[in-house]
Structure formats: structure tokens, C-alpha cells
Amino acid sequence: MELKKKLRFLDLYAISSGAMISSGIFILPGIAFSITGPGVFLAYMLAGLIAAIGILSVVELSTAMPKAGGNYFFIARSMGPLAGTVTGVLSWFALSLKSAFAIFGLAELCTLAFGINVHLAGYILLTLFFLLNAFGVDLASRFEVLLVILLLAILAAYVGVGYGAVEPLRFQPLLPHGRSALLAGAAFVFVSYGGLINVSSISEEVASPKRNIPAGMISSVITITILYGAVLYVTVGASDPSTLLASVAPLADTARGFGGAVGYAAITAAAVLAFITTANAGVMSASRYPVALSRDKLIPGFFGRVSKRSGTPFPALIATTLLIGGSLTLELEVLVKAASSVILLNYVLASLSVMILRASRIQSYRPSFRTPFFPLPQVLTLVSVAFLIVHLGFEAVEVTLSFIVLSLLLYFLYGKRQMKREFALLHIVERMTDKRLTDSVLESELVEIVFTRDELVKDRVDAVFRGASCLDLSSCADRKTLFSLAAEHFAKEGFGSQAELEALLEDREAASSTVLSPFIAIPHLVCGGKERFGLFAVRCIEGIAFDQAHPAVKAVFFLAGSMDRRDLHLQTLAAIAQISGSEGFEKEWLAVRGGEGIRNLLLLGGRRRGQSELL
């Protein structure tokens, strides 16, 4: 069952932003300050810059394949089910760990305020977030939007009021532990930007994904990077270093210094809002990974069940809640490093996926947003992430490797026996070895995704294209040979005798040439009978000699139909003319592989749909 499309730009912006603003800014600055020194605000902004570059690949993939599970889905389609399983499990754990990180921070505040056990408080809060998400994504997202607006307003006020209390001498020296400490600090706080991958995992539930996904994700990371830099600059400049190092709530303690009790209360309230928004967005997003994995039969199908009434994937939501509950027992620093390392690895895999899909030349890979200056952002992401992972230390790598081993066990013990899937990397190998390894399943799946994404209404011409027979000639041919092949095909389909059909084609050509350009011809004929119509498409890269004026026609579309299908004949003729006249058609036509590639090119061709095609 498909998830309901209820999320718009503001929802995405709030979910992404709310998932980023949490413990990363309200708890981590003191620890990050001990690593980096006064230049900690630069560490946050460096991490944000790397996240912004890396997210371009995620945005491209999310607009091409807006499906539940986000990065799992497009990595499985680019690198195969093994890589997909590892990614899906890692992403599920990463978002669950990040949510646990936020719930841990909120539980600490509850313990300070009410004196209850921190773990008990955490489990009570987790139960509340489960119930909120159980009522559906629309209620959870509206709740998220309201809280994020309040949160941004409070933090903006913090920067505005606190700027006057900043003492420049507190930034001397800026990087007392050297430049390597800046990288270590950026790696440590990278978890603060982990919320960005939340949007990709819920992309199937986004209305108008072509516009809303790029706008929501890119505007969110820009906003939060600038906000983090400004907030940390004020925090360092307005705090005594010894106080900052010892504080478990550095922003609140700093606000008390320049804003008194009111400032302390306001930032404490903001921290509560931040923990709530991150935990809520994390529970919502993480629960979509088991849905995607179960759809591909990599885990039991039970996890993919979705409530018809609320659109909520209850089994996946319950499993995610239990995983977060178990994560609450981990130490804070281990929790942060493990989440950061997994999120960084996801950026690497997303960048590699874009590079693979571009290199595969799959015609139906059609993102509405393409990474500018490709492949520079992908290369920069790979290099910068490698540096950050190294600076996280062995403990983080050890936790990540344990997750990878668990993912591999899941795949080999269950998923491998259940699922065989075509993926883009096979297309590259196929082209390099000149061996047929794929059967166009991936291209056809991407075609269906584009139809759903763009809300295209399938009409009668689509049915004609899907049922078309296609021939890819490997050598030159003349018109007579071509007409003989077409007549033979239509005769087998019951349109008449081969000799009669061949004569009709020659008579039609003699009356008026069907060659529309040096590249394309559309011979068409009317046959006897009723309710008969068919399309026979021929490609010849070396060219077909129609006549002396057109010695190398490379695309030929034969249309044959009875008189009662005249309207469909005209619709199809108009559709092919529009598609073949579009910019880039000739290049795409020469690049497609096999009959399925030809059909998919026609299905995704730019044309008017429905009654507007009637002439």
C-alpha cells in the first residue's frame, strides 16, 4: 500500500530543521569546545558546509526516486540489494540513535525539573512520541511546524540579545589545539546535521516532490548552518571558558549570564522544543526504513503493513520505538559518535549512487534537480567525509562496523534468498563487457516512479506505447527491407496478409513521403477489420536508406489501424511528433538499449496528454 502524499514545503522545512536543532546545539557545544577551542563555531559551520555539499546528491536522488526509505531505496537501485540492505539498516539505526540522543536530552531536563529517574523519563517520552506518530504523518507534521517556528524565533532572539555581550578576547587563540582539532570537532558535531536525511526517507509522502524536496532540504541546511554559527559565536563570546567546559546546558547558562532568569527560561524552553521536534521527526522518518526494506523482501513483509485509516506503518513504527528504547542505554558520547559515523557513511553512498546512475546512462533516471558542477560536489563529499570519519576515532568506526556486520547477516540469512533485483551498476558493467546482464526492470520501475511523482494520468497513447513492438537493427537497411519487416510483423498480429500490407506501405510512401526529417519517419496505414491498432518502432543507429534525399533515417515508427480507431491513430501520431521534436530526443534515441528502452523513452517523452492530443 502506498503512503499518503500529505507533506508540503513548510512541512519538509520544519521536519528537516526540527530534526537538526536539538542536542547537537543545546548539549554538545561544551564537549565540542573542549575538542576545538573558541573556534568551535567554525567546526559547526564546516560540518554544515560538508552537509550542504553532500545533501545535493541526496536531493537529486530523492527527486528521481521519491520513495519510502529514501537513501536505502536509491542506493539499492544503484548498487544492488546488498548495499541497499546495509544502507537501510544503518540509516534506520542512525536516525533511531539520533532520536534517542534527543530523548536523552529531554529526559535529562525532566530529571532536573522533577527529580524522576532519567531512563524512566526517557521511556515515558518515547511512548508519547509513538502515540503522536500513530495518529498519522499529517498530525505529526503540523505539530512539527508549530514547534519549529517557536524554536527558530527563540534562537534568533538569543543571537540578537546576546551579541552585545560578546567579548572578542575570548576568541584568542581561535584554534589552540591546531587545525586538526577543527576537523575533529566538525566530525564530532556532524550528527547535528543528521536530520537532513529525514526528508529523503519520507519523500514518498511529499506532495509535488519535484519542487518541495529541493526547496525544503536546501533551505533547511542553509538556515541551520547560519543559525548554528551565530548561536555558537554568541555562546563562546559571552561565556567564561571554564563555565562552558563544565556546562551540560551551555546555551541556557550563557543566556542566564546576559538575560537573567528570563533568558535562562527562554533557552530552556527552546531546548525542550528542540528535543521534541528532533525526537518526533526521527521517530517518523526512521520508521519508514523497515517499510522500504520489507517491500523489497529484505525483511519480513509484516513490517511493510500500512494502516488504511491513518496511513501509519504500525509494525515499522513499533520496531523503531523499541530500537530507540534500547539505544537510550548507551553512553552519550558513544551515541553521538556512532550516529555521526553512520550519517557520514550515508553521504558517501549517496554521492557514489549519483555517480553510478549518471554513468549507467539509464534513460528513465530523470531527477527534477541535478547536482550542479557534477561530479565536483560528489568528489568533495567523498574526500571531506573520509577526513571526518578518520577524526572520529576507532570507537565510532567499531560501532559502525558492528552495524554493517549485522546488516550483512540479515541479507545473507534472509534477504538474499527472497530478492533478486536489477541495479544501475550492472548497466555499467554490461556496457564495459558488452554482455547482456539486465532486462530493463530497473528502467521500467523508474518510469513508474516518474509517472507517480509527476502525477501523470495514463491515457490511451501510453497503452499503445507499452504494447508496442520494437526492433533494433544492427546494420544498415533499405526501405524495401524495412517495409517487408514491418508488414511481416503486422501480418502476424492479424492486420492482413504480408503482401497486402507491404503494398499499402509502398503506395502510401509513393503518394507522400512519410519522412519527417533526416532522422525520423512515421509510415502509417489504414487496414481492414475493426478495433485494430498497433505500433512497430524500429531503430537503426547506422541508418535506413528511405530514398536519395534521406539516406540515413535512424528512427521509424509504423502505425497501423482500422478506420474505427482513427482518433487513436491521430493521437498517437501527434504524440510521436511531439516527442521526436523535443530537444535532446535524437541523442536519447541513439543512447537507449533494446526494445524496453525504446518504449520507456516514448512513455517519458514530453507531450500533451489526454484530449488535447486530438487533431
Image (cartoon, rainbow, N blue to C red):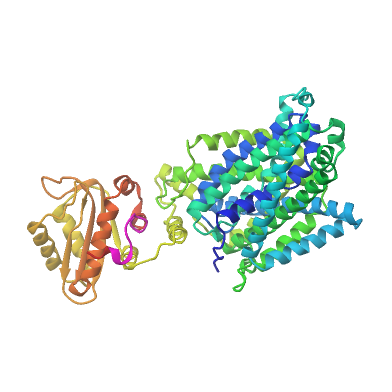
Q: Quadrant of residue 414?
A: bottom right
Q: Is residue 182 above or below residue 344?
A: above
Q: Residue furthest right?
A: 115
Locate residue 532, reporting x and y percent. 23, 73
Query: Does the magenta-highlighted stretch encompass residue 604?
Result: yes
Left or right side of 377 for 158: right
**411 over 312 or under it: above or below:** above
Q: In the picture, which quadrant includes the N terminus?
A: bottom right
Res 226 quadrant in image = top right
Q: Is residue 585 visible?
A: yes
The answer to which of 280 and 579 lies nearer the viewer is 280
Q: In the rendered structure, which segment of residues is drawn in magenta?
A: 602-612
Whether residue 463 sits left or right of residue 525 in the image: it is right
Task: Indicate yes or no whether the magenta region holds residue 180.
Answer: no
Q: Measuring 66% from the left and 35% from the top, which residue is drawn there?
A: 45
Which of the 4 image quadrants contains residue 384?
top right
Location of the C terminus by quadrant is: bottom left
Q: Residue furthest bottom?
A: 530
- Vertical position of residue 292 compared to residue 338: above or below: below
Q: Of residues 525 and 437, which is closer to you in this image?
A: 525
Q: What x and y, as percent, mark residue 81?
A: 57, 54
User: Residue 361 location, x and y as percent?
Assistant: 41, 46
Residue 356: percent from left, percent from top = 49, 44
In screen coordinates, is 576 left or right of 358?
Answer: left
Q: In the rendered view, does 186 fall on the left or right side of 580?
A: right
Question: At 39% from the left edge and 65% from the top edge, which residue is drawn?
Answer: 457
